[in-house]
Amino acid sequence: MSNQIIGKVDYITVLLYAILVLLGWSTIYSTTVPIDGTSMFDFSATYGRQLTFIGVTIPIIFIILLLESKTFERLSFVFYLIGIIMLLGLFVFGSTVKGQTNWYKFGGFGLQPSEFVKTAVALLLSKFLSYNQVNLKSKNQVLIAFAIIGLPILLILAQPDMGSAMIFVALFFVLHRFGLTAWFLISGFAAIILFFLALNFNPYYVIGFLLLVLIIIVATSKKIKRTLIPLSVLWVIISGFVLFSNTLYNSLEPHQKDRIDVVLGKEVNLKKEGYNLNQSKIAIGSGGWFGKGFLEGTQTKGGFVPEQHTDYIFTTIGEEWGFIGTLTVIGLFLALFFRILYLAERQKTKFAKVYGYCLVTYLFIHFFVNIAMLIGLFPTIGVPLPFFSYGGSSLIAFTIMLFIFVKLDANQVNEW
């Protein structure tokens, strides 16, 4: 039975995963190895610990592949409940790192529950959407789907960890793929645009401009009586949101405001709040077309880029392997994303299909936001690059998430 399942595994996905993990480890090695050099099997070093985490994933992969595929669907609520309990436990037993209480500490190792809760949420959401009667047209069904995603978001925001919370919000794209009206996505994008407009301009100017738009719409509409009241109510709601945006911004911690200011292009101190982004751009730009070579990055070896082995690890690729190297890595990620989408579309069970879309959404939003942070298109919010950034929780959680789908694909059940 085990040989049959392993024989059906999609080896293209497995190969892409293995290449990304190995490239990630070599990049961590290059970023953290001392100039005088030490053994690559020094398990007290950062790259040595990452090698240990990679070793831990190997038995986990085999366990997942040997489990009955229906296990993940049957126990989806149990996994979700365990995840919520782990998030709640942080408020009692969690350790605070950089102002965020989002880690459990065990000696020299740490565990970040939010990384594993992503899989639990994807499983339960897939289970819910796989019911035949669910099509996200009923308000009650929409509310249940929102609750599955929203509960962990609220608990993570309370830590506070805005970066991890934002990852869960991306699942609304999955809901849209399986029947949720586009109005929710449009509203979300509009809220983001209004938020930044309110910070860049006087909020009353923004409200006045929206009022002018409202007047133009009403004046040119042939159904004034039908549109006047709902548009007026919408303008009041939007105006309130614009005013609230400034209140929300002013309630943020100074370092959070600084990160937003950097993205908005406001004048920043390059030795303080603008330092990380500026050094990131310098490191990537210095790589040119072909890079400086493995272990030859001067910005990397000089330690000029903070957190380079975690959030800013892509800068090492840019400096050492240049534009060609970054394109290669981006190409590998895109190949993985498209492969998962292809496999998701061929699934014979709706549960597996929805889960595949959850998986690719998680991976893509991590990939996109991490790279966008490095070039100033997004605030620095601590989102790791999948399979590259240092960290056991991240690597193991992404591996579990991916190989559950590999298992579901290998066990194509003739249902749905």
Image: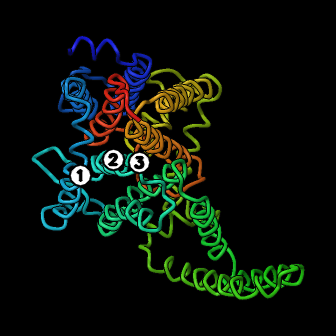
Judging by the rendered image, the residue that carries numbered circle 3 is 132
The structure residue drawn at horizontal position 36% and vertical position 64%, both measured from the top left corner, is 147
Looking at the picture, tell me which residue is in the foreground, 412 or 380: 412
Q: Position of residue 168 (x, y in %)?
A: 41, 55
Q: Position of residue 26 (x, y in %)?
A: 38, 24
Work out whether mark 2 precedes mark 1 in sequence or the reverse, and give the earlier one.
1
Query: Mark 2, residues whose alpha carbon is within 10 Å: few (<14), some, or many (≥20)?
Result: many
In this rendering, is residue 296 above or below 164? above
Q: Position of residue 79 (x, y in %)?
A: 21, 48
Image mark count? 3
The structure residue drawn at horizontal position 55% and vertical position 78%, both measured from the top left corner, is 245
In this rendering, is residue 172 above or below 269? above
Kindly indicate the quadrant of the structure image that contains residue 220: bottom right
Looking at the picture, tell me which residue is in the foreground, 358 or 208: 358
- Is residue 303 in sight in this rendering? no
Judging by the rendered image, the residue that carries numbered circle 2 is 127
Q: Quick check: 211 left or right of 17?
A: right
Amino acid type at circle 3 is Asn
Judging by the rendered image, the residue that carries numbered circle 1 is 77
Asked if the residues shown at circle 2 and circle 1 are in contact, with their CB atoms under 8 angstroms apart, the answer is yes
Q: Position of residue 317 (x, y in %)?
A: 50, 30
